[in-house]
Image: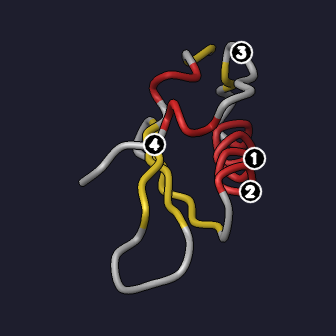
């Protein structure tokens, strides 16, 4: 099953260093935007899902909560 890369929501974790990402009921954490995105790809692959496209500008996925 393919998921659009735009469905990944990355946000800054308050009171901690780093970022987190949410997509398809998966939550990943990392110290940088590319690391969080790579970890999300890995988490989705474990459940037979994949992101349909690779993104070059991770700041487009950054949202504020």
1 or 3: tag closer to the N-terminus: 1
Question: In the rendered structure, which disc, 2 or 3, sits on the residue that comes first in sequence?
Answer: 2
Residue density around tag 4, few if under 14, some if 14–19, many if 20 or more, within 10 Å: some
Q: Earlier in the sequence, mark 4 or mark 2?
A: 2
Q: What number is the disc on residue 5?
A: none
Secondary structure at numbered mark 4: loop
Q: Tell me the residue at 47%/47% (across/down).
A: 10
Residues at marks 2 and 3, CA–CA distance in whole angstroms: 16 Å
Pick whichever, 41 or 61, lies toward us: 61
Q: Where is residue 5 drawn, in percent x and y?
A: 58, 23
Height in image: 37 above or below 50?
below
Q: Residues within 10 Å of mark 1 (few under 14, many from 20)?
A: few
Return the residue nearer the eye: 10 or 39: 10
Q: Which residue is mark 1?
A: 38
Is the residue under label 4 in contact with that under label 1 (CB below 8 Å)?
A: no
**Where residue 7 appears, x then y in whole percent?**
45, 26
* Residue picked out by circle 4: 62
Q: CA distance from mark 1 to mark 3?
A: 13 Å
Question: Mark 2 — residue?
Answer: 35
Distance (Cα) linking label 1 and label 4 = 15 Å
Image quadrant holding the C terminus, namely bottom left
- For the point 71% across and 53% down, which residue is it? 39
Of the two numbered discs 1 and 4 on the same chain, state the one appearing first in sequence. Answer: 1
Image location (x, y in percent) of residue 46: 72, 43
Q: Is residue 7 above or below residue 46?
A: above
Q: Which SS class for mark 2?
A: helix
The residue to which callout 3 is attached is: 53
Tell me if 52 is positioned left or right of 13 in this view. Answer: right
- In the figure, 13 relative to 61: above or below? below
On screen, residue 55 versus residue 25, left or right, reads right
Q: Nearer the viewer, residue 1 or 19?
A: 19
């Amino acid at each position: 099953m393919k998921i659009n890369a735009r469905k990944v929501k990355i946000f800054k974790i308050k009171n901690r260093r780093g970022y987190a990402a949410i997509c398809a009921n998966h939550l990943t954490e990392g110290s940088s935007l590319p690391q969080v995105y790579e970890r999300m790809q890995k988490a989705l692959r474990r459940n037979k899902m994949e992101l349909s496209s690779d993104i070059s500008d991770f700041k487009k996925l950054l949202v504020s909560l």
